[in-house]
Image (spheres, rainbow, N blue to C red):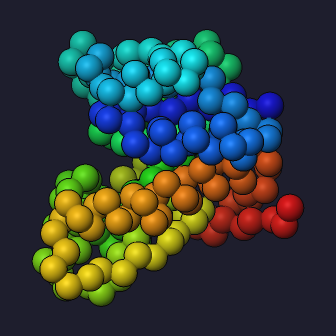
Amino acid sequence: MVRIAVLVSGGGTNLQALIDAQNRGEFKDGTIAAVISSSPDAFALERAKRAGIPGYVINRRDYASNQELTLVLTRQLRELDIGLVVLAGFMYILTSELIDAYPNAIINVHPALIPSFCGEGFYGLHVHEAALSYGVKVTGATVHFVSEDCDGGPIILQRAVPIQEGDTPEVLQCRVMEQAEWRILPEAVSLFCQSRLRVEGRIVHISPA
């Protein structure tokens, strides 16, 4: 059984999608064992509490750098015997210490079709603003393994979402979450827990069930 830790910073809508998937029995070989927040005020902690999942706070404000935060976080994950780390709206870039401790065992969801509109500075509404400003007709979401390059790790799953006339960043954000993020993130977690993902260079192979 893979013990999963979900890292959050805010409202936790992607966390809720994972909790719902777990309640539907989709994580047959895994369980959400911990929710760890970078903020004590994150509503995601309330979602975890309601679901009976232990919540922890490692407050970014208590540390001088992302590296210090990463070191404390890595120790916490080891103590909890975590096998998969899921970044679900976690707002800080983690340093190599965690990536080295969990090679190809950290996944992130990004609200665009990587390699478009990704990297430093592309998060939240900024991603959707950029997509609309560029004039693309299709956007979507990507779940990928985390590497030292921001949004640069091997891609696990992607799902496209059409842009519609009159979209605002807020409207597009909701559509991407509902039609893409909340679907492919639980699917990727399930695939990992079933040991169906194999990484060769930049390519992630998915074995049949």
Image quadrant where one finds the C terminus: bottom right
Residue at the spot 57% in from the left edge and 37% down from the top edge:
19
* Residue at the image position 55 percent from the left and 59 percent from the top: 183
**In the picture provided, is 57 more to the left or to the right than 163?**
right
Measuring from the top left, give residue 197's x and y in whole percent: 73, 57
Quarter occupied by residue 121: bottom left
Please provide percent x and percent y for residue 198: 74, 59
* Closer-to-camera residue (27/199): 27
- In the image, 93: left or right of 25? left
Q: Examine the rendered structure and indicate whether residue 15 appears above or below residue 104.
A: above
The quarter in which the N terminus is drawn is: top right
The one nearer the camera, 19 or 97, is 19
Query: Is any atom of residue 121 visible in this view?
Result: yes
| Nearer to the camera, 21 or 7 | 21
In this rendering, position of residue 137 left or right of residue 33 = left
In the rendered picture of this protein, how many numbered marks are placed on residues? 0
Whether residue 97 can be seen here: no
The residue drawn where x is 30% and y is 25% is 42
- Observer-nearest of 172 and 141: 172
Q: Is residue 203 above or below residue 21?
A: below
Q: Position of residue 32 (x, y in %)?
A: 62, 30
- Quarter of the view holding residue 30: top right
Work out which residue is located at the far right of the displayed protein and give it: 209
Q: Where, by quadrant of the figure, is residue 111 drawn?
A: bottom left
User: x and y percent of residue 100 in the render?
Assistant: 56, 36
Residue found at x 54% / y 53%: 185
